[in-house]
Image (cartoon, rainbow, N blue to C red):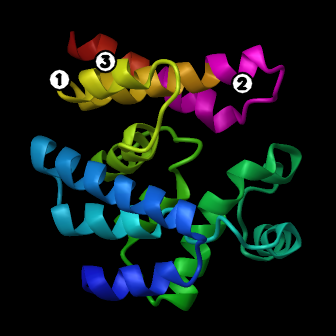
Amino acid sequence: MDQQKALEIVRQQLPDKRYIHTLGVLESAQELAERYGADIEKAKLAAIFHDYAKYRPLDEMEQIIKNEQLPQDLLEYNTELWHAPVGAVLVKKEANLHDEEILSAIKNHTSGCVGMSMLDKIIYLADYIEPGRSFPGVDEVRALSLLSLDKAVLQAMGNTITFLIKKNQTIYPDTFHAYNDLAEQIGRNN
């Protein structure tokens, strides 16, 4: 699927503000893919489709989680997590995109996972640092993204975990596991 067709499909799913965010993620994902030698076309498609299900009704997403063999514990955590794994299911069915690397990056862009691929990391990070984002810590992660993909993803996850703890919100276990996995990888490589 070419970029223009993908953007046309996604444009119909998102309000203007979220579509602009998607274009920012596209820009950041392309830059990260070029910098770290990832497949640029896959990075662009994963970025375009990463929020495909963001505005689906919660009851629809709940039914998809229940019916599509997605982790049922998702239903016990913040509904903001749901659009990522549900999006991967819907992109496959509705946009006829079957590339498992791209679907994995869409599925894991909110929580992370153990054993994240380079594309998983690029989309997770691009979503965090895209040019439209403005919150404490984002500039440090942007700077780190120029030096190390792994360290930038780890810092972004750490910031997210800290943010949720400060708000007394629950944290999905996959995020902790992803953080620990990445920290161990970085430790082994240093």
Cα–Cα gap, marks 2 and 3 = 24 Å
Real-space Cα distance between discs 2 and 1?
26 Å
Does residue 33 appear in this view?
yes
Q: Amino acid at mark 1?
A: Leu
Residue annotated with mark 3: 186
Residue at the image point whose x is 41% and y is 86% from the top: 8
Give the position of the N terminus as an image quadrant: bottom left
The amino acid on which the numbered mark 2 sits, given as a three-letter code, is Leu
Q: Is residue 129 left or right of residue 81?
A: left
Crowd class of label 2 (few under 14; some 14 to 19; many from 20; radius 10 Å): few
- In this view, the residue in front, 137 or 151, is 137
Amino acid type at image mark 3: Ile
Instruction: Identify the residue position indicated by label 1 in the image.
Output: 147
Relative to 19, does residue 8 appear above or below in the rendering? below
| Separation of residues labelled 1 and 3 (CA atoms) | 13 Å
* Of the image marks 1 and 3, the number of the one nearer the N terminus: 1
Q: Is residue 65 above or below residue 171?
A: below
- Above or below, 151 against 153 in this view is above
Return the disc, 2 or 3, that comes first in the chain's sequence. 2
Q: Which residue is mark 2?
A: 164
**Magenta region, residue range:** 162-181
Looking at the image, residue 90 sits to the left or right of residue 49; the answer is right
Residue 166 position within the rendered picture, expressed as x and y whole percent measured from the top left: 75, 14
Tell me, yes or no, whether the two marked residues, 2 and 3, touch with CB atoms within 8 Å. Answer: no
Q: Nearer the viewer, mark 1 or mark 3?
A: 1
